Amino acid sequence: MKICIDARWISPELSGIGVYTRELIRELSLLDDRNKYVCLFDANETLEQTRETTSFDQNPNWSATRLKHGVFSPLGQLAMPGWLKQQEIDVFHSPNWMIPFAAFPAGRRGRIACVVTVHDLIPLLFPDNAPRSKKRRFFPLYRTLMQSVGKRADKIIAVSKASANDIVEHLPVPRERVEVVYNGVADTYAPGTLPREPVILYVGRLDPYKNVPLLIEAFAAVREQLGPEARLEIIGSSDDRYPETAMTIERLGLSRAVTQRHYVSDTELLTSYQRARLLVLPSSYEGFGLPVVEAMACGTPVVCSRASSLPEVAGEVGVQFEPGNLQSLSDAILSAWCNPSPPGPLQRQAARFSWRRSAEDARRIYESA
């Protein structure tokens, strides 16, 4: 069987989707010696970056190719059906919601099976939570495309039970076509040897549903109780559409206590997890919440909202709060700061999530599709 993984979702500055795609490629190339794979890229830079970080092409069953059109290119939509046939692909896997629609006619199962990972339905369920995004501005088109994905995909991978339930309810898709395959955490995420610092860490984008201004408000509310050395560190790409984070820092006079780093390397991110006293993910919705499991693998206590998939991932070792509630978040931060969970239970919870298991499940889905 010949499988194509659409690696055009990998960008030089990795997002959660890029990490997901890279780790699947890494693990599948290590475990699968019975199927052939083609990784599809649209830029030499990301192709070489993926080669260096995964060594996928050391497996003789793996190859890579470039298509000059990006995931969202109309020309790419026109070119993909012929390319897939020419390459004699049996299964096409898109690691995110966009697929080459013409290659997979709605209601008709073709020779090429389509597997698509839908991480979340945030723009569909909460369109006002990303008011300046393209998905919000072109909401009717996005909704139509998502419903079309549901009709055309042979299998949909959901990264949590919460996301799976949303997919079945809102696309809608028959439950038997949706499979839950949790994300994983790389083996490199482990406790460090350097001492912890008085730092609250946030990792992620700055979209409104992430509730970063609320986190800053909570930090300001409890800062005196945390001590004069306490700091808040925000790691996430800058986004001119959402200036609220910077505005909140300025309004509360916290420029010396709050630092923002817009992008860090894998090594720098690992060090940040290892040194932080706790991680806070205050999102009102997450398809999975990679920072939670990455922090736990490093033995770092976690505070997260009691929303969507986060209770699944954090389990009983994560300190949870009511989403959007400033007092609840402030209390949770104080609790985790003053009575941190020991590393052992945190690491055991993180060990439930493995990229190797994710890859094994993906291979099973490819073969069944």
Image: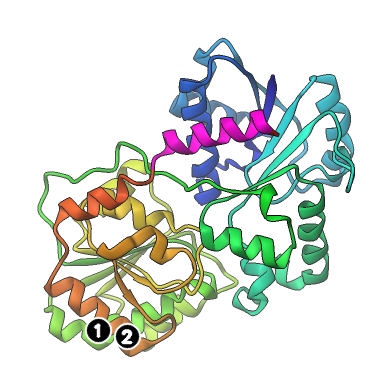
The boundaries of the magenta stretch are 354-368
Which is more toward the observer, 163 or 202?
163
Q: Residue furthest front?
A: 176
Mark 2 highlights which residue?
328
When the figure is inspected, residue 134 is found, relative to residue 72, above or below; the finding is: below
Local packing at callout 1 (Cα closer than 10 Å; few below 14, some 14-19, many 20+) is: some
Q: In the rendered view, how is the structure colored? A: rainbow
Main structural element of the magenta stretch: helix, strand or loop?
A: helix
Asked whether residue 361 is drawn in magenta, I would say: yes
Indicate the position of residue 20 as horizontal and vertical percent values. 51, 43
Image-quadrant location for residue 119: bottom right
Indicate the position of residue 222 as horizontal and vertical percent values. 22, 85
Indicate the position of residue 141 as horizontal and vertical percent values. 83, 65
Q: Which mark is residue 331?
A: 1
Q: Is residue 37 visible?
A: yes
Q: Is residue 190 left or right of residue 157?
A: left
Q: Secondary structure at mark 1?
A: helix
Amino acid marked by disc 2: Ser
Image marks 2 and 1: residues in contact by CB distance under 8 Å = yes
Q: Is residue 41 visible?
A: no
Q: Secondary structure at mark 2?
A: helix
